[in-house]
Structure formats: structure tokens, C-alpha cells
Image (tube, rainbow, N blue to C red):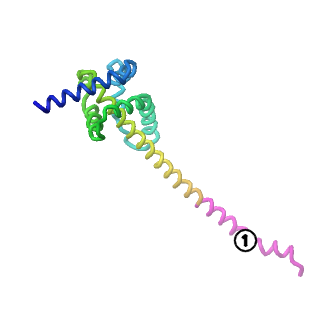
Amino acid sequence: TLLSKAIGHEENRIAILIQKHLSEKKQSEYRRLINKDEPNYRLKDLKKLPKSYKSGEVQKEIKRHKLLSELYASAYKLVKRFKLSQGNIRYYATLCTKYNINRLNELKNHRALLYLTCFVVTRYQISNDSLAQAFLVAYSDFSDKVKICRDEMIQEQTLKALENIENVPLILDLFMDN
């Protein structure tokens, strides 16, 4: 049918772009994400989103961001060459998220790499947003603590000033001639 021919043509176009613009070394780096011999399957960890903005969760997200940043530049360039819409990029990234490691390993190499590169681009952007939000939350908490500390110091200084106010007339008498 016409639809299956169009899909086949698009798959061939993407396979050619992957072979042409993604070195064997980079391809193996992406394949490592779904390699069963890797500790804890790296993709499995990358799929996790932070549950909160607490220090431990932010540290885990920073580690994920570091791994993603190693792949992001090549993934971004390749995805741009695919000339896919943002919707299609998200769609392929979602497929990567939905499929388990075994299913991704069963796919044709170019299809798995398509899903993985779209996933890396999308997840990297999510990670950036998440870390920026974590910074804002931490800054807000810090700002709130600073305001509380400021108010406590003002209150403390005010009390000290009130304690010493009764000594003001005595000090003034020292300087005044009767």
C-alpha cells in the first residue's frame, strides 16, 4: 500500500542518515545504553525522573545529566538532520521510554538508534528543566531562611537597644554642664 511504501522510504532515509552521519564509535556509545552487560542498564536509569527536589534526587539527576550531555551534541545534530517535527521527536523518544531493553535490542539497528537519539535529545532537555527548577526551589528555600535569620537578628538587636536605652540619660548627663 501507499502508506507502507512511505514508511519504508522514511526508514531507508533515516538508516542512510544514521550510517552517513553517526560514526561506528558513536553508534556503539548509544548501543551501550541498552547493553545488558552494562551495570544496571544505563537507559533504565536515564528513564527515571526525579521524584523531588531534595539533595539526593538532585544528585542523581546531575549524574544522569552528565551521561546525557556526553551524547547530546551528536544526538541533536543527527536529529536535526532527520528533519523530524518536534511531535515526531517526542513520539520516538516515548517509544524508547515505553519499550524495555530486550525489545529495543530486537529492533533493527537504525530504528533503535533513531529511538535512542530522540530519547537523548528529549531527556536532556527535561533534565535541564528539572535541574533549573531544582535550583529555583533551593534558592527559594535559601531566601526564606535568610529572611527568617534577618528578622531574628533585627529582633535581637532591637531588644539589645531597648535594654541600653535606660542608660542614655546617664550618658547625656556626663556631657552636660549643670
Q: Which amino acid type is marked by label 1?
A: Ile
Q: Decide: is 132 above or below 61.
A: below
Residue drawn where x is 23% and y is 29% of the image: 10
Residue drawn where x is 53% and y is 50% of the image: 142
Magenta stretch, residue numbers? 151-178
Residue drawn where x is 42% and y is 31% of the image: 73
Residue 39 visible in the displayed image: no
Secondary structure under badge 1?
A: helix
Residue drawn where x is 29% and y is 30% of the image: 115
Query: Which of these two is toward me, 152 or 166?
Result: 152
In the image, farthest residue toward the left: 1
Residue 19 belongs to magenta span: no
Q: Quadrant of the C terminus?
A: bottom right
Q: Quadrant of the N terminus?
A: top left
Q: How many marks?
A: 1
Query: Which of these two is toward me, 53 or 19?
Result: 19
Q: Looking at the picture, how far across and down is residue 57, in whole percent?
A: 42, 38
Query: Dot 1 surroundings within 10 Å: few (below 14), some, or many (20 or more)?
Result: few
In the image, farthest residue toward the bottom: 178
Residue 104 visible in the displayed image: yes
Query: Which of these two is toward me, 128 or 136?
Result: 128
Answer with left or right where residue 130 lies relative to residue 175. Answer: left
Residue 155 belongs to magenta span: yes
Q: Decide: is 110 above or below 122.
A: above
Magenta segment, principal secondary structure?
helix
Q: Looking at the picture, how far across and down is residue 109, in whole percent?
A: 27, 21
Q: Looking at the picture, how far across and down is residue 54, in whole percent?
A: 44, 43
Residue under circle 1?
165
